[in-house]
Amino acid sequence: MTSHSLLGRTEREVTWYQRRDFLRVASIWTATGGFTAAHAQSRSNVVQLEGDVLVNGSRLDTERAIQVNDQIVTGPGARLIFVVGNASFLVRQSSSLKIEGDPSSSFVGLLRLITGAVASVWGKGTNRRIVTPTLTAGIRGTGVYTELLPEQGGRGYFCNCYGTVDVASGGEAVESQATYHQAFWAEVGTKKGPSLTPAKKLNHTDEEMETLAALIGERTEWQITGRKGNQYGNDYF
């Protein structure tokens, strides 16, 4: 397993892909058509569900499909992995988010994170965004990790794990081009100083992103090139 740093998260949260129950579910997911079947809406798009998860106020089960414009809330100790359109999502415990888009196409155009954390991998596409209380990210084909940290005074954290992302916070904006984890702190509006500052890779792992990419039939940039950088990101100034 690759080295990683944790802040307010446990080791168990970032090693879910090693668990026997997930390996079994992932094997079944692949054997029954996986991404192709889910995209064709011939099966549920919930890959794994652990703990209490509400969708539009109702408790989720593995037979139900998550759709665009759904509101998702995970309880303490919960975890949810699902695929919609050509994007895959890992929602950590105690999170609240909404996915928005065109129901007729099932492609997600907007991920609105209200609390908590979500890792996501997006296939090729345009006009898609991630919005949090502290930042906006315009994404194309990429893998990203987004988290809000109340213990950090409401700070937002965003990692462009690979790909090209337009990141904006406050009055600042930057185009992030990364092959291996370029991360940012997005400061709350009341804090003096820069709104975007460099950060290191935090609270997520290479293996998580690789697993999410595989769920939509893709590979991460470092899997394709066979090369990794460091976990501290690149200076974007």
Image (spheres, rainbow, N blue to C red):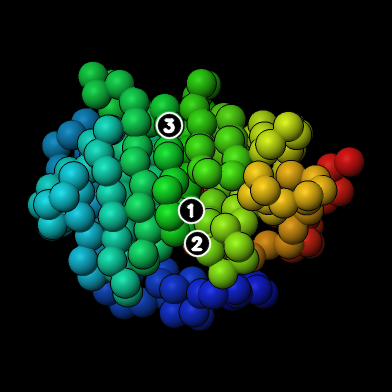
Residues marked 2 and 1 touching at CB (< 8 Å): yes
From the image, tell me which residue sits under label 1: 119
Query: Picture coordinates of residue 137 (x, y %)?
Result: 59, 35
Q: Tell me the amino acid under the disc marked 2.
A: Glu
Occupied quadrant, residue 2: bottom right
Query: Picture coordinates of residue 95 (x, y %)?
Result: 37, 58
Name the quarter where the N terminus is drawn.
bottom right
Crowd around label 3: few <14 · some 14–19 · many ≥20 (10 Å): many
Residue in the image at 28% along x and 55% along y: 73
Query: Picture coordinates of residue 218 (x, y %)?
Result: 49, 43
Residue in the image at 43% along x and 31% along y: 110
Query: Picture coordinates of residue 93 (x, y %)?
Result: 36, 66
Residue 180 in view of the camera: no
> Toward the viewer: 124 or 36?
124
Residue farthest along the right direction in this orientation:
237
Which SS class for mark 2? helix
Residue in the image at 28% along x and 27% along y: 106
Q: Is residue 233 left or right of residue 104?
A: right
Q: Tell me the amino acid under the disc marked 1.
A: Ala
Q: Tell me the amino acid under the disc marked 3.
A: Leu
Crowd around label 1: few <14 · some 14–19 · many ≥20 (10 Å): many
Of marks 2 and 1, the one in the foreground: 1
Of marks 3 and 2, the one in the foreground: 3
Marking on residue 110: 3
From the image, tell me which residue sits under label 2: 208
Which SS class for mark 1? strand
Please say if 231 is above or below 3.
Answer: above
Q: Is residue 112 left or right of residue 127?
A: left
